[in-house]
Amino acid sequence: MTDNSQAKRRLRSQDWFDNPDHIDMTALYLERFMNYGITPEELRSGKPVIGIAQSGSDLTPCNRVHIELARRVRDGIRDAGGIPIEFPTHPIFENCKRPTAALDRNLAYLGLVEILYGYPLDGVVLTTGCDKTTPSALMAASTVDIPAIVLSGGPMLDGWHEGELAGSGMAIWRSRRRLAAGEIDEEEFLQTALDSAPSVGHCNTMGTASTMNALAEALGMSLTGCGAIPAAYRERGQMAYRTGRRAVEMVWEDLKPSDILTREAFLNAIRVNSAIGGSTNAQPHLAAMAKHAGVELYPEDWQVHGFDIPLLANVQPAGAYLGERYHRAGGTPAIMWELLQAGKLDGHCRTATGKSVSDNLRGREARDREVIRPYDQPLKERAGFLVLRGNLFDFAIMKMSVVSEDFRKRYLEEPGQEGIFRGKAVVFDGSEDYHKRINDPSLEIDENTILVIRGAGPLGWPGSAEVVNMQPPDHILKRGIRSLPTIGDGRQSGTADSPSILNASPESAAGGGLAWLRSGDIIRIDFNQGLCDMLVDDEEIARRKTDGIPPVPPDATPWQRIYRRTVTQLSDGAVIDGAADFRRIAENPPRH
Ligand code: FES
Ligand code: MG
């Protein structure tokens, strides 16, 4: 809490605005801020300068509510005795940025690091929403390590189409299948998609956006309950105000990301991800955030700490409901409350509230058991990510919470073969190849086919694309089979409900095993042992290696080239190689 002795502590911003050794530079730093009416007295008052990292814009409609919310953040900062300074971050709009928004996460990270380090900021409110806006902001906050707090923008209101819930992404995947099966026409397909977006806010399903905002909260980086409040609710503006206030207090307490983002906090986030049926994109994003926080997080942690956690949130894509019901049921604090009671959460972790996780969760039991289940009456047991390895890759994951009963019966519970599946590979090089050939009868795709896509990883795409949730050919859909097993070195949408083995690392373009796979090869998957292999002998693999790695498109922009030269694999978070060497850089002020 603010007290006068702490208030006298010299702040980072004073090195710019109130530096008697460099009055010439101080004059320069001060003068241009005057031109919109701010006074030198304000900037030289010794009050904390709090950045508002504005991620909303017309190009990031999912976060656009922050343009409005920033007014309440400013009010909170002012009321707590700080000075707000708002600035834009690099836009990242998941659904629209080509070739993929994932390419921009590290770019937004780099930009924000330079801003937080190079400008007179004592603390920052990180406005988040759309998928990559959350990890990029938290990665940067860790690198710089000034007091930082997340303000989520919140999901859209629930979408409805003809009396049924129409959730972000889900509405599109479902109607795409219905379109292919001839049940609806293109006009209805388009209308369902439009109906799934009824208000300001980010995706209202438990896709990557809602997942990452829930995990920011689980990590302790936002106020309690921040993640789930719908963007259009009055509580969202109130949360913005309280977050602004809290940012100022955090500066006086010197409460930094490095005090909050511990290994225990990350393991909490992994468990929460299983319980909410969170996005598979949480894996690379948490890996990346941990890297920049200097925390050892291992790919196996998903299996060891996350796999056995049951699904508690009845929210699409793993469940039935959308963001509004989830929030009213108690949201992420109610999920965490269940995990804490079950002994599955470390309650000692410090958080942005200044209190521990268990203190934050007092009185946060769920209010609607249809939407948030008790730990011992879950929607699904063992709902985490299955971690797989073999001669096709060293690491890949499969999201068990979305594996349908139909799929389980067909593939996982065949008598005498429980958990073992053999299928014939049909290999696609990128999504253009998939779209061109998926309905080609000569591929002879049937229920024993495994659809494989490669060239979709960080190097291959570039950026790693959400393309592994490949829809089966029309003739399979018309027979009522809605999914085939798929494998790929890309990602899949957080809103997808496909039984995919994805994020395969190393990717084909890096010489991973998928590069040597050929259509017609038999793939054996042992779900119990976590093994996935092509049944091709070593000599044959060695021979195929002489064919070289399947080609990928050339760099199309300067950033694509820099990105490809620096990026690590998805198992490792697809971060900029070497960037994690820079930690807590705010401890050393920049020269001038
Ligand atoms: Fe932006 Fe889903 S597309 S949140
Ligand atoms: Mg997506």
Image (cartoon, rainbow, N blue to C red):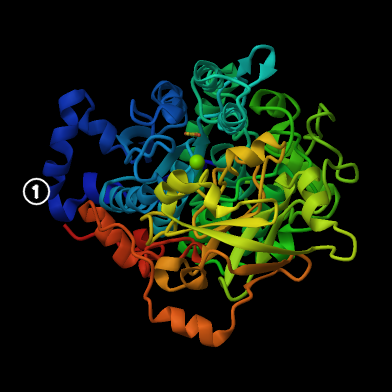
Q: Quadrant of residue 84?
A: top left
Task: State the residue at coordinates (44%, 30%).
Answer: 63
Residue 404: percent from the left, percent from the top? 76, 44
Q: Quadrant of residue 268?
A: bottom right
Q: Is residue 241 above or below residue 389?
A: above
Residue 100: percent from the left, percent from the top? 39, 45
Residue 540 in sight:
yes
Instruction: Judge left or right: residue 529 versus residue 109.
Output: right
Secondary element at tag 1 = helix
* Between 210 and 379, the one nearer to me in the picture: 379
Task: State the residue at coordinates (62%, 30%).
Answer: 181
Amino acid of disc 1: Asp
Q: Is residue 269 above or below residue 236?
A: below
Instruction: Judge left or right: residue 56 versus residue 23.
Output: right
Residue 589 in sight:
no
Q: What residue does disc 1 label? A: 24
Q: What count of labels does the image hold?
A: 1
* Between 44 and 477, the one nearer to me in the picture: 477
Residue that protrudes farthest toward the top in the picture:
162
Residue 139: percent from the left, percent from the top? 44, 54
Task: State the residue at coordinates (76%, 48%).
Answer: 407
Residue 302: percent from the left, percent from the top? 67, 61
Q: Quadrant of the C terminus?
A: bottom left
Q: Quadrant of the N terminus?
A: top right
Q: Quadrant of residue 62?
A: top left
Instruction: Judge left or right: residue 314 versus residue 24.
Output: right
* Between 46 and 32, the one nearer to me in the picture: 32
Instruction: Judge left or right: residue 161 versus residue 97.
Output: right
